[in-house]
Image (spheres, rainbow, N blue to C red):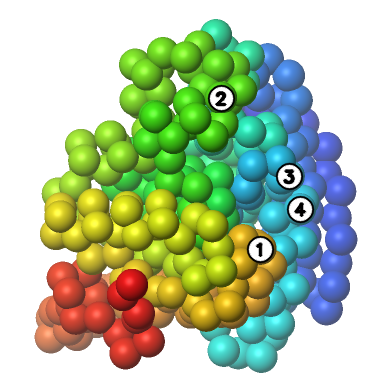
């Protein structure tokens, strides 16, 4: 793949299993003024079917995690499901959250994670991989701190992302961050709430509630053995107060483990159903008006409160 304008040549390391490929890519990050790395998963037959384009999911790791660690949590289950034909092929992007950023930009510029993901990595991947580059085929997901980041990015960028899944999210308000992650509040935001607001899940959700309500498919998943269940219940209730259906699901016996959440499969199936409900751009013109209306109605029912039978509300 050739680098696009504005990027230095990428350093690429690949691991291939059964024709699916997991690639670690290093590019220069202007916002961080240094090289940064991320991981891209391409599904089986990607290389041998050059005319096909795929949905893109950005998957964010938890605090203390890495891009490769998140890929290790996700790829075995994802690849097995695609190979078995139970979900459609997708491209996955695993960015680096620089350990404990809560996926924001630091007040003094020393850790620019939000800018790296949205303004640098995402454009690079869509320029160099065969994604279906529209919002209907682009989604966010994440675990723990990554659940916070995924939901925050989806709220800030409803014009870019049409679905979000958060697993066991660390869904902190400012007071929670100050209490439970004081080093993050200090290093990222200088203990000043105003520095946090642009990357606050709660503030950004409130600001963009109408767009989330009408145009984003939302799913929250939390285990009943996860200490984050209380914060997830609190955020679920906030979404409901905004008339946003969180498709809230409680998993019996699941603790705060990213592998267990993803292996259970509900989040992956949710995204597969979401992508299946919209046509690829090239095929859209061949659909009848009635079919297009049916697709719109299907997505509207999922957003406005006709919960699936497996949803459990605590």
For residue 230, which quarter of the picture?
bottom left
Vertical order, 292 against 90 (above or below): below
Vertical order, 269 against 4 (above or below): below
Of mark 4 and mark 1, the one earlier in the sequence is 4
Pointer 1: what residue?
257
Residue furthest out toward the top = 108
Label 3: state its secondary structure. loop
Of mark 2 and mark 4, the one earlier in the sequence is 4
- The reply to whether the C-beta atoms of the residues labelled 3 and 4 are less than 8 Å apart is yes
Give how far across and how far down residue 279 sits, in percent. Answer: 34, 74
Front one among 46 and 90? 90
Pointer 2: what residue?
182
- Residue beneath the point at 50% across and 11% down: 190
- Residue beneath the point at 44% across and 35% down: 176
Label 2: state its secondary structure. helix
Pointer 4: what residue?
69
- Residue beneath the point at 83% across and 78% down: 18
Give how far across and how far down residue 183 sits, in percent. Answer: 61, 23
Q: Which callout, 4 or 1, points to the residue nearer the camera?
A: 1
Q: How far apart are labels 1 and 3 at the CA level?
A: 14 Å
- The reply to whether the C-beta atoms of the residues labelled 2 and 3 are less than 8 Å apart is no
Of mark 1 and mark 3, the one earlier in the sequence is 3
Give how far across and how far down residue 6 sits, in percent. Answer: 61, 24
Q: What quarter of the picture does the C terminus occupy?
A: bottom left
Q: How far apart are labels 2 and 3 at the CA level?
A: 21 Å
User: So how many labels did they put on this image?
Assistant: 4
Q: How far apart are labels 4 and 1 at the CA level?
A: 12 Å
Pointer 3: what residue?
66
Q: How far apart are labels 2 and 4 at the CA level?
A: 24 Å
Label 1: state its secondary structure. loop
For the residue carrying disc 3, how many other residues have a C-alpha within 10 Å: few (<14), some (14-19), or many (20+)? many
């Amino acid at each position: 793949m050739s680098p696009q304008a504005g990027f230095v040549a990428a350093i690429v390391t690949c691991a291939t299993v059964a024709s699916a490929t997991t690639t670690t890519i290093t590019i220069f990050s202007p916002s961080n003024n240094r090289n940064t790395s991320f991981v891209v998963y391409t599904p089986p037959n990607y290389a041998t079917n050059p005319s096909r384009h795929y949905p893109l999911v950005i998957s964010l790791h938890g605090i203390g995690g890495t891009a490769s660690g998140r890929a290790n949590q996700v790829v075995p289950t994802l690849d097995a499901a695609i190979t078995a034909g139970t979900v459609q092929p997708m491209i996955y992007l695993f960015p680096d959250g620089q350990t404990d950023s809560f996926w924001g930009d630091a007040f003094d510029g020393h850790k620019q994670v939000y800018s790296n993901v949205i303004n640098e990595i995402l454009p690079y991947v869509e320029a160099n991989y065969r994604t279906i580059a529209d919002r209907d085929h682009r989604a966010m997901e994440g675990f723990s701190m990554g659940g916070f980041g995924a939901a925050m990015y989806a709220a800030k960028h409803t014009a870019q992302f049409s679905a979000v899944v958060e697993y066991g999210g660390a869904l902190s308000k400012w007071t929670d961050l100050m209490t439970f992650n004081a080093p993050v509040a200090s290093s990222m935001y200088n203990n000043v709430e105003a520095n946090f607001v642009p990357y606050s899940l709660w503030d950004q959700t409130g600001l963009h509630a109408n767009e989330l309500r009408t145009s984003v498919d939302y799913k929250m998943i939390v285990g009943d053995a996860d200490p984050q269940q209380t914060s997830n219940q609190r955020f679920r209730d906030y979404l409901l107060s905004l008339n946003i259906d969180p498709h809230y699901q409680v998993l019996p016996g699941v603790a705060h483990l990213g592998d267990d959440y993803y292996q259970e499969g509900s989040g992956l199936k949710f995204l597969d159903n979401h992508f299946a409900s919209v046509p690829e751009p090239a095929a859209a013109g061949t659909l009848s008006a009635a079919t297009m209306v049916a697709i719109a109605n299907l997505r509207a029912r999922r957003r406005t409160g006709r919960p699936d039978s497996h949803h459990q509300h605590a």
